[in-house]
Image (spheres, helix red, strand yellow):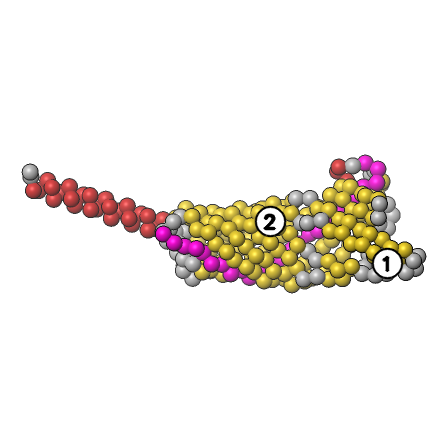
């Protein structure tokens, strides 16, 4: 056998193997430094109910129920990646969940678009800022990397509801409640790296604020409540070092 031909083939196979190994390594070696991204998701807030809200002027008690629709959240993120496994992030979030019904004792007002007669229109709108920390389970040079994370921050929560009979709004029924409260969130998700500089992902987040006391206009006693929602998100992130 021609020794020169064998050597040539061996060198070719060696170079090809090295090129493949380099390509695999490159494809899942995210660069450290600043990354930025956008997040979009669908959110769900659990229904609430409060009983025995007292009006001492009339010596009566009232029960209230509130249901939410699935709606949307979006966020902008700026993160710093220390290495493959650790990163921190600043996040600015907007979330909105519209009311599906508002129940007072035995009378239920449904969403404006889904009913006639007595109906209502309302929502809980949240704007928040978070500092999040993440741990990426980066192993075996895989492009798909699960992660967990958590964040602390501060939230502006705006609740508004108004009542209608068909298209006519009842006078003096519009109720607004605005608070600023500390907030936390827990995060679990998966990242798919396109290359060292770009990634796509999806995650599940639970976000909640501390509680506050709220007294309805018709009552003299307050109820304890907070904002909380669960969001399923998709996102895009890219490195500023690209």
Residue 120 in picture, x, y percent from top left: 79, 44
The residue mark sitting in front, 2 or 1, is 1
Residue furthest to the right in view is: 58
Residue under the image location 15 percent in, 44 percent down: 10
Which residue range is magenta in the image?
A: 116-140
Q: Say which residue label 2 marks.
A: 231
SS assignment at label 1: strand
Q: Is residue 16 left or right of residue 202?
A: left
Q: Say which residue label 1 marks.
A: 54
Q: Is residue 46 left or right of residue 91?
A: right
Q: Is residue 145 left or right of residue 20?
A: right
Residue under the image location 60 percent in, 49 percent down: 231
Observer-nearest of 55 and 5: 55
Alpha carbons under labels 2 and 1: distance apart: 34 Å
Residue furthest to the front in view is: 52
Give residue 239's quadrant in the image: bottom left
SS assignment at label 2: strand
């Amino acid at each position: 056998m021609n020794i020169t031909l064998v050597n040539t083939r061996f060198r070719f196979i060696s170079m090809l193997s090295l090129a493949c190994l380099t390509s695999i390594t490159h494809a899942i070696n995210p660069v450290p430094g600043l990354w930025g991204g956008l997040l979009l998701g669908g959110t769900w807030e659990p229904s609430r109910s409060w009983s025995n809200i007292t009006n001492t002027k009339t010596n009566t008690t009232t029960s209230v129920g509130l249901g939410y629709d699935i709606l949307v959240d979006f966020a902008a993120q700026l993160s710093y990646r220390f290495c493959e496994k650790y990163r921190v992030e600043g996040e600015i979030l907007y979330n909105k969940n519209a009311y599906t019904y508002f129940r007072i004792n035995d009378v239920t007002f449904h969403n404006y678009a889904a009913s006639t007669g007595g109906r209502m229109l309302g929502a809980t709108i949240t704007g928040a800022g978070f500092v999040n920390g993440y741990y990426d389970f980066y192993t075996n040079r895989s492009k798909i990397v699960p992660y967990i994370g958590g964040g602390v921050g501060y939230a502006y929560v705006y609740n508004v509801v108004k009542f209608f009979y068909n298209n006519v709004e009842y006078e003096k029924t519009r109720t607004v409640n605005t608070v600023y409260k500390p907030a936390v969130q827990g995060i679990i998700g998966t990242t798919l790296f396109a290359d060292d500089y770009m990634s796509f992902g999806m995650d599940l987040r639970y976000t909640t604020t501390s509680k506050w006391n709220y007294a309805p206009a018709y009552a003299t006693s307050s109820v304890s409540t907070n904002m909380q929602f669960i969001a399923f998100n998709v996102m895009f992130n890219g490195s500023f070092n690209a």
